[in-house]
Amino acid sequence: MTTQAAAQPTTPQQAGGGPDLDPAVRLGLYETMVLSRTYEEAILREYHADKGPGFDIGKGLIPGEMHLSAGQEPVAAGVCAHLTTGDAVTATHRPHHFAVAHGVDLRRMTAEIFGREGGLGRGRGGHMHLFDPDTHFSCSGIIAEGYPPALGQAFAFHRQGTDRIAVAVTGEGAANQGAFHESLNLAARWSLPVVFVVEDNDWGISVPRTASTSVASNADRAVAYGIPGERIEGNDVEGVYGAARRAVARARAGEGPSLIEVHTLRLWGHFEGDAQGYRLDLEDAPSHDPIPRYEAALREAGVLDDETVTRIRSAAGERTEDAIAFAKNSPVPDPASATSYVFA
């Protein structure tokens, strides 16, 4: 295998975005981002609705931790625009944006988040353990856990002689885990059809990347394994789209894995209830929200107008509220069935 130098950070134009991108593609990216944000805003509402007085993480219709991905929508939208439901996606403990972008059924996903029988896992997994065989989507609360399973799926696709691929997503903190390096090495050695995606939101819980990682870009680590690495700055959805297009085409053509790192943004806490006292950038974060920024760019380009924005936001709201209603109307699992579906 020929060793390739890690790619330099790209501008949006170099990454295949900008004015030359098909307006229908740009509109689709915006729609995906809006649906993801609308969905998570509703989950946020329902999660906090009955946690008081004060904040009791164990109370309410959705008890337990909740990790939301507001601000990171460009990564999922840009990557998943090139995928089919036959391709596999393994996501992180902050998975909703990738689940939405990859087409996981909103009703069943929401029921799973609410712990109901109508959920993807009959309410047994919750929001960090979403498994959807129909779209080959999965996620896990274990750091970097999604990388090795993605290799298994990619290996199966390769042996079957298909052009299906696997996308493995993790955060920048997990790029220091052994599973990250072992997976890159094996995928490169076997030339597996995998696209590795690193979401760099600057924070591994409360630890800044600069205090935990010895390199400025995890994309630079790709060269050590003989694969292309590319970093997208500015949380730019069209930059992600262009990088993903190249990486997905390479994987489908049998040319092996690639790594994409996106410098993205975590608008909300690591988990709901996180006061984020450690974040000096918190006050400025809303000004970097990628959705209004992208909306403004598309308006300026003539791709969006008031009527289209209203239509897209209304459709996202209707789908979201339908999913919430479905979840609330789905029964709670019978405690007597606690061990059902656990043992063969």
Image (cartoon, rainbow, N blue to C red):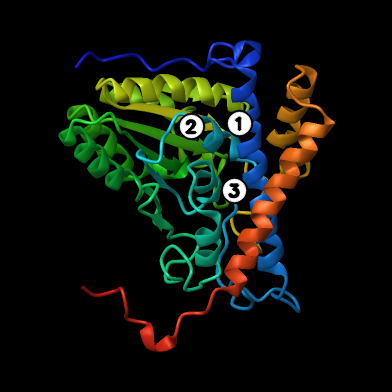
- Residue 294: % across, % down: 71, 28
Give me the residue at 50% from left, 65% from top: 112
Q: Say which of marks 2 and 1 sits in front.
A: 1
Amino acid type for the residue under numbered disc 2: Val
SS assignment at label 3: loop
Can residue 37 be seen from the camera position used here?
yes
Give how far apart the Cα atoms at labels 3 and 1 are.
16 Å
Q: Say which of marks 3 and 1 sits in front.
A: 1
- Residue 321: % across, % down: 68, 59
Give the mark, 2 or 1, whose residue is nearer the N terminus. Answer: 1
**Residue that lies at the very extreme toward the bottom in this rendered image:** 336
Residue at the disc numbered 2: 79
Give how far apart the Cα atoms at labels 3 and 2 are.
15 Å
Give the image quarter of residue 323.
bottom right
Give the mark, 3 or 2, whose residue is nearer the N terminus. Answer: 3
- Residue 222: % across, % down: 34, 25
Can residue 285 be seen from the camera position used here?
no
Amino acid type for the residue under numbered disc 3: Ser
